[in-house]
Image (tube, helix red, strand yellow):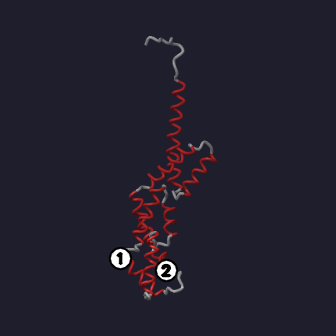
Amino acid sequence: MAESLYEKIMQRAFRLLSYKPRTIVEMRGRLLEKEWADAETVELVINRLQELNYLNDETYASNFASSRLSMKPLGPARLRRDLQLRKLPPETVEATLTEAYAERPEEDLIASALAKRIRLKGFPTDRAGRGKLIAWLMRRGFSYDLTMRKLREISGRNQDSADQDSADQDSGPDDDQPFDSAQ
């Protein structure tokens, strides 16, 4: 029994969605890959999938952002670029960024990224190491101003703890006082 073109395209769309969620633009492109699919029928299928809420760019963007931020801390610039690569509408991208960074503030994310990096590689001791750390944070999408502010905070804390360590080492038992083991 011959199935209609609409049913054939709808079945392909369901099969594609069973593998992973997709944006509307991505779904349209994948459905039009087949030579037997025509643009008019593809649009009917996409409209029906939207009515059924199988295709929803806002939900896709929100889930994508939440997933990316839970896997590794990213700044807004990097997340924006990742969302734009998914060919989402600009207003959806901006709304998603606002929502995502309201839930997880950028300050917390950069602090988390820095803590992990310093735990794994140690705090940079020279100018080149500091430059690499700054470049790494910038590639992660954090702003230069925030990166520098956080590094200054951490540098201050590291300097304070280094001063405390050296003070602790200097204040050993007093040589002028005899050591009394009875105490």
Q: Does residue 123 appear to the left or right of 55 in the view shown?
A: right
Query: Which quadrant of the figure contains the C terminus?
Result: top left
Query: Which quadrant of the figure contains the N terminus?
Result: bottom left
Report the Cα–Cα distance between label 1 and label 2: 18 Å
- Point out residue 25 in the picture as x, y percentages from the top left corner: 48, 76
Residue marked by disc 1: 52
- Point out residue 65 in the picture as x, y percentages from the top left corner: 44, 63
Could you tell me the amino acid type at mark 1?
Answer: Leu
Q: Which mark is residue 112?
A: none
Question: Where is residue 136, by image quadrant?
Answer: bottom right
Residue occupying the point 54% across, 55% down: 144
- Point out residue 123 in the picture as x, y percentages from the top left corner: 56, 43
- Quick one: SS at disc 2? helix
Question: Foreground: 102 or 65?
Answer: 65
Residue farthest toward the front in the current orientation of the protein: 1
Residue farthest toward the left in the current orientation of the protein: 52
Residue occupying the point 54% across, 25% down: 170
Q: Which mark is residue 31?
A: 2
One can see residue 160 in this view? yes
One can see residue 89 in this view? no
Could you tell me the amino acid type at mark 2?
Answer: Leu
Residue 74 vertical placement versus 170 (above, below)? below
Residue 29 vertical placement versus 85 (above, below)? below
